């Protein structure tokens, strides 16, 4: 934008100067020609009294003296063939002046000035002088150079002023762009210092107001989520008491463990809702998390007659995703298996090192995944549509990705790539 404004200013300046300087240059040339012609005419007219009254010898002497002083040829044509002063042949202009008419004419030598002198006893005399081309254009070249230099200086001055004005526009716009990118990267404390024209200052104020409103709305949302999550503690406490009242110790222990896991998830949700959205990136051990969650879901799989195959590389397998978020992602994937496949359907959980880091694979022997885009709130199976989206966001937050495939046996296969901690830079 800055270069375009400077180019526009240069174009306008050049057009203005051309429209002004070209006529001025032509006028300077015409003035120089007219001035030289007037001087030559005045010199020639100074001979008129002499030519009208003096004898030939006096006229010759006066003409030669004038030619020497002016540096121009001066000739006097008397009636007949007498030529005094600079010897030159008669020209058509001289012949016309002998009829009593004074004039100027262009010739090969320059501008010819002829003056008719009447009143002599023997007829009309003619005074002729020639203004050379060099005298007609004397000083014109220097004047044109001065005008050209003045035009260049004015163009450069216009470019300098345009550049200064462009900087006053571009700098606030660049700052607006930087702050908008910082806001997009979750730096909600970024603000713009209003500067530049009134329109840009208004935009800066609107952007600052928007950032402030986003902070307020996010704070309200986090508090509402935290409050909603905190309300779940009361039914969890009642459920724990019910579990402790069971007569069979194994069932009581299993249900209590499930309640503990749910309570940990609720506590993590509260902490996540109330913490800053741009914390330092921390990771977890994928092997330990996956082994723990598979063991948890294996109890439910046994109750529903599902075969669980677990293939885990020996740990530790560090990833950028925190342990709580990885556990939530795996719970979402395994929950989909239990929700969308009939009882007795087997599933496999694999965790292995990969060239991109660590890959977590969940494969089931069910009917397969309906063709649909993984999008939050959209589910072709009639559920909430949050499970796969949770896993996808966990993977992308850790520098990885989620991919859906059809298993060789016809079931669904979900692959979750997780990057190692060294490949992700904290914002």
Image: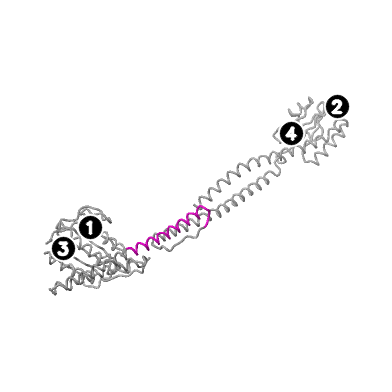
Which contiguous range is marked in magenta? Answer: 195-224
Mark 3 vs mark 2, CA separation in Å: 136 Å
Q: Is residue 112 magenta?
A: no
Q: Under tag 3, what secondary structure?
A: strand
Decide: is 14 above or below 179. Answer: above
Q: Quadrant of the C terminus?
A: bottom left
Sort mark 1 into few (<14), some (14-19) or many (20+) by Cα contacts within 10 Å.
some
Within the image, what quadrant is residue 304 found in?
bottom left
Residue on which the image places disc 1: 404
Q: Under tag 2, what secondary structure?
A: strand
Residue on which the image places disc 4: 112
- The mark that comes first in sequence, 1 or 4, is 4
The residue at the point 82 percent across, 38 percent down is 64
Within the image, what quadrant is residue 105 found in?
top right
Sort mark 3 into few (<14), some (14-19) or many (20+) by Cα contacts within 10 Å.
many
- The mark that comes first in sequence, 3 or 1, is 3
Nearest the viewer among 278 and 148 is 278
Residue on which the image places disc 2: 119
Mark 1 vs mark 4, CA separation in Å: 100 Å
- The mark that comes first in sequence, 2 or 1, is 2
Residue on which the image places disc 3: 347
- The mark that comes first in sequence, 3 or 2, is 2
Report x, y in % for residue 97: 77, 27
Observer-side mark, 4 or 3, equals 3
Q: Under tag 1, what secondary structure?
A: strand
Q: Is residue 223 magenta?
A: yes
Mark 1 in CB contact with mark 4 (< 8 angstroms): no
Within the image, what quadrant is residue 79 found in?
top right
Nearest the viewer among 140 and 283 is 283
Sort mark 2 into few (<14), some (14-19) or many (20+) by Cα contacts within 10 Å.
few
Report x, y in % for residue 273: 33, 65
């Amino acid at each position: 934008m800055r270069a375009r404004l400077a180019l526009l200013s240069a174009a306008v300046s050049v057009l203005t100067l051309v429209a002004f300087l070209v006529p001025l240059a032509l006028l300077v040339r015409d003035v120089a020609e007219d001035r030289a012609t007037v001087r030559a005419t005045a010199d020639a007219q100074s001979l008129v009294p002499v030519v009208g009254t003096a004898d030939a010898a006096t006229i010759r002497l006066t003409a030669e003296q004038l030619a020497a002083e002016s540096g121009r040829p001066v000739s006097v044509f008397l009636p007949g063939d007498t030529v005094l002063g600079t010897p030159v042949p008669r020209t058509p202009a001289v012949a016309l002046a002998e009829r009593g008419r004074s004039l100027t004419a262009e010739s090969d030598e320059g501008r010819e000035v002829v003056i008719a002198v009447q009143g002599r006893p023997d007829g009309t005399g003619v005074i002729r002088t020639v203004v050379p081309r060099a005298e007609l254009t004397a000083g014109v070249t220097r004047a044109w150079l001065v005008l050209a230099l003045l035009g260049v200086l004015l163009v450069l001055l216009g470019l300098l002023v345009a550049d200064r004005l462009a900087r006053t526009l571009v700098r606030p716009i660049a700052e607006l762009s930087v702050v908008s990118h910082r806001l997009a990267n979750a730096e909600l404390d970024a603000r713009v210092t209003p500067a530049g024209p009134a329109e840009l200052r208004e935009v800066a104020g609107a952007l600052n107001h928007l950032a402030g409103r986003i902070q307020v709305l996010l704070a309200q949302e986090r508090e509402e989520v935290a409050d909603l999550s905190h309300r779940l503690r009361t039914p969890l406490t009642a459920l724990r008491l019910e579990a402790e009242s069971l007569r069979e110790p194994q069932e009581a222990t299993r249900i209590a463990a499930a309640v503990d896991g749910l309570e940990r998830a609720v506590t993590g949700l509260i902490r996540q809702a109330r913490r800053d959205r741009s914390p330092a990136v921390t990771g977890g051990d994928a092997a330990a998390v996956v082994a723990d969650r598979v063991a948890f879901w294996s109890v439910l799989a046994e109750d529903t007659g599902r075969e669980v195959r677990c293939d885990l590389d020996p740990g530790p397998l560090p990833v950028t995703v925190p342990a709580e978020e990885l556990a939530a992602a795996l719970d979402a994937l395994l929950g989909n298996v239990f929700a969308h496949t009939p009882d007795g359907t087997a599933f496999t959980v694999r965790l292995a090192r990969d060239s991109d880091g660590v890959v977590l694979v969940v494969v089931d022997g069910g009917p397969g995944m309906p063709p649909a885009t993984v999008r939050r709130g959209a589910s072709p199976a009639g559920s909430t549509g949050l499970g796969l989206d949770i896993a996808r966001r966990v993977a992308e937050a850790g520098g990885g990705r989620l991919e859906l495939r059809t298993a060789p046996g016809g079931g669904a296969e979900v692959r979750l790539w997780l990057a190692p901690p060294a490949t992700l830079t904290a914002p």
